[in-house]
Image (cartoon, grey):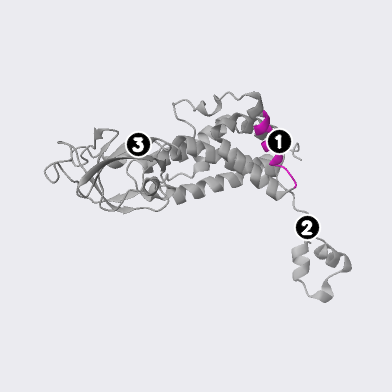
Amino acid sequence: MNCADSCDRPRSNVTAVEAAACRRPRRVRRPPTWARTSTFACFLQAHVALLAPAAAQPETPLETIESNSSLPVSDEEFRFVLDEPTTATVDGLIALLGSPSYTEREQASQRLAELGVVAMARLRDDYLATDSLEVRLRIERLVYDLYMDLHVFGRNGFLGIQQDVRPVTHTDDSRVPPGGAGVRITRVIADTAAARAYLREGDIICEIDGQPIPDAARDPNFGFGEAIRVRGPGAEVELTVIRAESTRKISAVLGRRPREYYRSHPVLGPMLVDALNEFPRWWDHHFRRAIPPEGDSH
């Protein structure tokens, strides 16, 4: 008779041995370290639902997508050569990921994220060598963020304005170059490149780096937003701005496009989905360890 059966019987019919068995806590066998990273697959699937456009989400869960692509797996993340001081810094920070101090673990994670993809090779080496669940989980999250930053979020520039849907043409204002289109600002988003460059509502941007802005009506794939996006975060652009009766040059250093703007974007949405779908294959290729034989877990 098992414990569950005996516990359901009337108390008077339960023997002392059976009662003691019911009170004794059951020993739960923990899965080995390599198996506990299934939470990582759940984390990835949650990010698909959160970030990817609903219409473009893969029907197959990320953890079950077959790696049958004929394209080679990217290894550009591991090509960075570190000098000795940087290597020592990275190794020291990775060692702190297993620190007893939560504050030290958090600070180390933040510093590694700031160092960026240059730390990827050392993170891989330590991930494959460690049996610490805490360290492995932290490296998993770091690697995911660094991969997505390299392939998606770190590639798309952002000025930080909302614009009138109707472009300003040369016919509307002779200061707009013929064949080009002026962008009338309807809102400057706080704490963005546009705000830091002191752009204003009502300004008309008519050139980027001395070149006319493509008319999105004629070239929908390369209008003003796309011209900004492809320059990437950190790029400095010189904008020719019509303000009232004057025309002036204003420089701005582009920021990162906020993640909430990826979901419905016609270019960035598919880019995001492609990266999310490719990451499990990339992870399996570079980070997946062989499953130990049965009975060899600890």
- Disc 3 target residue: 237
Relative height, residue 130 to residue 28 (above, below):
above
Nearer to us in this view, 166 or 194: 194
Name the kind of residue labelled 2 in the image.
Answer: Arg
**Which one is closest to the eye, mark 3 or mark 2?**
3
**CA–CA distance in space, label 3 to label 2:** 65 Å
Q: Residue at x 74, y 39 (%)?
A: 297
The spot of residue 259 in percent (x, y) is: 43, 47
**CA–CA distance in space, label 1 to label 3:** 45 Å
First-in-chain label (1 vs 3): 1
Note whether residue 222 is visible: no
Note whether residue 208 is visible: yes
Left or right of 115 on screen, residue 163: left
Q: Are marks 3 and 2 in contact (CB under 8 Å)?
A: no
- For label 2, the crowd category at 10 Å Cα-Cα, with few meaning under 14, some 14 to 19 and many 20 or more, is few
The residue positioned farthest toward the front in the image shown: 246
Q: Which residues are magenta?
A: 88-100
Name the kind of residue labelled 1 in the image.
Answer: Thr
The spot of residue 121 in percent (x, y) is: 60, 29
